[in-house]
């Protein structure tokens, strides 16, 4: 595992919502990009690629090229009426040490993917088959789920969805997100003590200021 993957590993388990907040409420992919099964969770540097709709030849090549710990991020035109990624590819990726995959398109074999616990996120599920005709681009800037993803950006996924952290901001975002996690722990403690969110966050003062305007 290379240094980029080791850094990305520090993001594993940090809620995607906290990461988006740490970037000023940015970086989150479209709500259409969902985990194939609820407990799917991943973090790793992006290996980006583009596919023609219903053609997954490029993904097969990317799995061969991918480094251990990386996340495949695939722009397939948002076409979800064919299963570009399924059980065979998930097993191939898992054996290779790939940390997960995000498909802006369709995937299939959800039950088998869940059984092997390969973190797979996609725009939709569809049992339709694919062709292997055209090699797209690999390791280039793409857009996936409405977010620009550059090679090496850190991609984090959990039950809520997927967030992309620009590689150059990784250390800052990680520190900010950890601070948010710690703050939320303290908020939960205060809630358990009987305080309200209005008190904890000072929303009463906020409302008073708004009412004076």
Image (tube, rainbow, N blue to C red):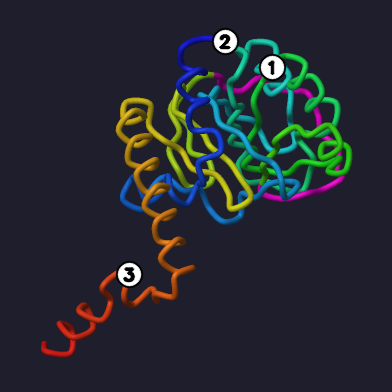
Distance from Cα at disc 3 to Cα at disc 2: 42 Å
Quarter of the figure with the C terminus: bottom left
Distance from Cα at disc 1 to Cα at disc 3: 43 Å
Prevailing SS of the magenta stretch:
loop
> Would you name the residue on which mark 3 appears?
200
SS for tag 1?
loop
Residue at the bottom extreme of this rendering = 211
Of pointers 3 and 2, the one earlier in the residue sequence: 2
SS for tag 2?
loop
Residue at the front extreme of this rendering = 193
Of pointers 1 and 2, the one earlier in the residue sequence: 2
Is 141 on the left-hand or right-hand side of 13? Answer: left
| Position of residue 48 measured from the top left corner of the image (x, y, whole percent) | 54, 25
Question: Quick check: marks 3 and 2 in contact, CB under 8 Å?
Answer: no
Q: Nearer the viewer, mark 1 or mark 3?
A: 3
187 magenta-colored: no
> Would you name the residue on which mark 2 appears?
1
> Would you name the residue on which mark 1 appears?
97
| Position of residue 138 measured from the top left corner of the image (x, y, whole percent) | 56, 19
Question: Quick check: marks 1 and 2 in contact, CB under 8 Å?
Answer: yes
> Residue placed at 58% from the left, 29% from the top?
50
| Position of residue 1 measured from the top left corner of the image (x, y, whole percent) | 57, 10
Start-end of magenta stretch: 123-138
Of pointers 1 and 3, the one earlier in the residue sequence: 1
SS for tag 3?
helix
> Residue placed at 55% from the left, 22% from the top?
47
């Amino acid at each position: 595992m290379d240094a980029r993957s080791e850094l990305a590993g520090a993001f594993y388990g940090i809620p995607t919502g906290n990461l988006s907040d740490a970037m000023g409420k940015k970086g989150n992919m479209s709500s259409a990009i969902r985990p194939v099964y609820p407990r799917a969770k991943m973090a790793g540097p992006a290996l980006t690629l583009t596919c023609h709709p219903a053609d997954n030849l490029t993904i097969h090549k990317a799995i061969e090229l991918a480094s251990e710990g990386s996340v495949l991020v695939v722009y397939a035109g948002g076409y979800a009426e064919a299963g570009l990624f399924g059980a065979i590819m998930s097993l191939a990726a898992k054996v290779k040490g790939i940390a997960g995959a995000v498909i802006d398109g369709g995937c299939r074999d959800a039950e088998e993917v869940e059984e092997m616990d390969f973190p797979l996120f996609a725009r939709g599920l569809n049992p339709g088959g694919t062709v292997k005709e055209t090699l797209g681009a690999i390791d280039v800037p793409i857009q996936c789920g409405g977010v620009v993803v550059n090679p090496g950006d850190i991609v984090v996924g959990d039950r809520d969805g997927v967030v992309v952290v620009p590689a150059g901001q990784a250390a800052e975002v990680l520190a900010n997100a950890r601070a948010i996690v710690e703050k939320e722990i303290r908020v939960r403690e205060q809630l358990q003590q009987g305080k309200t969110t209005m008190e904890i966050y000072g929303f009463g003062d906020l409302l008073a200021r708004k009412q004076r305007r």
